[in-house]
Amino acid sequence: MIRRIVINILMVCISLALALMLLEAIVRVAGTVDADGQFSFLGYALEPYVLPINRLKEGIDAYLHNMDTATILFDEQTGWAYRPNSLRHQGTFTVNSSGMRSRREFSEEPLPDTLRIAAFGDSFTAGDDANDDQVWTNQLELALQQHGIRAEVMNFGVGGYDMGQAFLRWRGTGQQFMPDIVIFGFQPENLDRNVNVFRILYIHGPSIPFSKPRFYMNDGNLELINVPALPPERMVATFEAFATHPLAAFEDYYRSRDVVSKWWLSSRLGAFIYAVTKAQEGASGADYGPASERGMLGKAIVDAFAADVAERAADFFVVHLPLPQHMAHVHSGGQSPYRYLLDYLRQTYRYIPFDESLGPEYMDESYWGPTGHYGAEIEALLGQTVARAIADCIEERSCSTQRFDDPAQFAINR
C-alpha cells in the first residue's frame, strides 16, 4: 500500500514536471525577441527587461523625418503636446490653434456673460475614442445649457500625460485663458506615470519617443526635474549611457533592467505568469498608500494644482475617470488599489466620482472604444454627471465664480 502511494505521488510529480517543461518550451519557442533582445510572449514583455535603444532610435528617426506633419510634437515644458491646427484619428479629433481639442477658437479673455471651464488630464480627458461632437467636454457644454447655464468648455487633455504634465499644462498655457472653473481629470493609472521619465520605458509597444518632466518629493517638498525636457536629438545617446545618467535615478521603470530581479524569473514561464499577474492587478503591483512614493506624489501634485488654481480665483473640481479594468475589478468585489487618494480627493476637493455612475452594465465592450477609452454613450454620461455637479455648486452658491457678481449673469434666460 505504501509503495503504491509513493509510486502514485512520484507519477504525479513526474507528470507535473513534464507539463511545466512542456509549457516552458512552448513559451520559449512561441515567444518573440525584438531588435533590442527583449523577449515577449502573447503581447507581454517578460523580465529581464532590456533598454529599447533600437526601438527608441526608430521612433526618434521617424519623428525627426516627419516633424512637419506629426500631430504630437516635442514640448520642452511638458514633454509633448498636440500640433496646433491639426487633425488626429482620421479627422475625428480636431486640435485648434491653441493646441486644445476643439473645432472652435477661444480668445484669451473670457466673454462677460459666459462661464468658462477648462479641463486638464490625459487621453481620457481628451476623449481619444470619441469624435469632436461626442467628447465629454462638448457634452458638458450641452448639458449645462439644459441646466440654464451659458458656458464654454475648453479641453486641454493630452494623450499619455501624467498628473504633473496636466498641472504643467495649466501653468504654462491653461491659466492664460482665465477659466472660472478648472476640472482635473484624475485617471488613476497616472500614479504610475508620475514616477516615469522616459515614456518608452513605461510602454513596451509603440510609444511616444520623448522624455517628460517629473515631479518628486524632496524633504516633503514638491520638486521638478528634466525641465526643459531632454530634446529628441539627445535621447539615443542618453540611453546608450543610461546607467550613469542623472535621470536614471528618477526612472522607476528602469528597475530590473539587464538583470533578473527574482531568481524564478529565469524561467520564461515564470516570467510570463508574473507579467500576467501584474497586469491583472491593474498596474505594476505597486503600493499607492499614504507612505508610498506614488501616493505621496499624487497627493502633492493635486494639492499644488488646486492651490495654483485658487490663486487665480478659479474653482477646482476633480473628476475620477476610471479605466475599464478598474471598473471590472471593483464590480467583481475587489478593493480599489487607489482607495487612499480617491478618499483624500473626496474629502478635500469638489470631487465627482464618475465611477459610481458606471454600473456593471457598462462593462460590456460595446460601451468602450477600440483603444479602451470611453465610447459615445459613456462620454455623454460623463458630460451630464459633471454638469450636474457644477449646476448644483452654482445653485447652492458654494462655487465662487468670482468674475460674476451674480450667477444670473451667465444664465441663458436672464
Image (cartoon, rainbow, N blue to C red):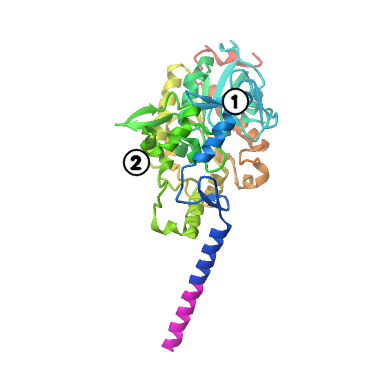
* Quadrant of the snapshot with the N terminus: bottom left
Q: Nearer the viewer, residue 400 or 170?
A: 170
Q: Which mark is residue 67?
A: 1
Of the numbered discs 1 and 2, the one sitting upstream in the chain is 1
Horizontally, residue 271 falls left or right of residue 366, namely left
Which three-letter amino acid code belongs to the residue tagged 1? Met
Answer whether residue 240 is visible to the viewer in this image: yes
Which three-letter amino acid code belongs to the residue tagged 2? Ala
Residue 186 lies in magenta, yes or no? Answer: no
Mark 1 is surrounded, within 10 Å at the Cα level, by few (under 14), some (14 to 19) or many (20 or more) other residues, namely few
Q: Position of residue 252 (x, y in %)?
A: 41, 40
Instruction: Look at the numbered disc 1 and give the secondary structure of its residue.
Output: loop
Instruction: Look at the numbered disc 2 and give the secondary structure of its residue.
Output: loop
The residue at 62%/25% (across/down) is: 101
Horizontally, residue 173 falls left or right of residue 222, namely right
Residue 6 lies in magenta, yes or no? Answer: yes
Q: Nearer the viewer, residue 393 or 279?
A: 279
Answer whether residue 159 is visible to the viewer in this image: no
Q: Position of residue 135 (x, y in %)?
A: 64, 30
Q: Main secondary structure of the magenta part?
A: helix
The residue where tag 2 is placed is 291
The residue at 53%/69% (across/down) is: 19
Q: Position of residue 378 (x, y in %)?
A: 64, 37
Mark 2 is surrounded, within 10 Å at the Cα level, by few (under 14), some (14 to 19) or many (20 or more) other residues, namely few
**In which quarter of the view is residue 370 placed?**
top right
Q: Nearer the viewer, mark 1 or mark 2?
A: 1
Chain part drawn in magenta = 1-16
**Which residue sits furthest bottom?**
1
In the image, residue 349 sits, relative to residue 282, either above or below, namely above
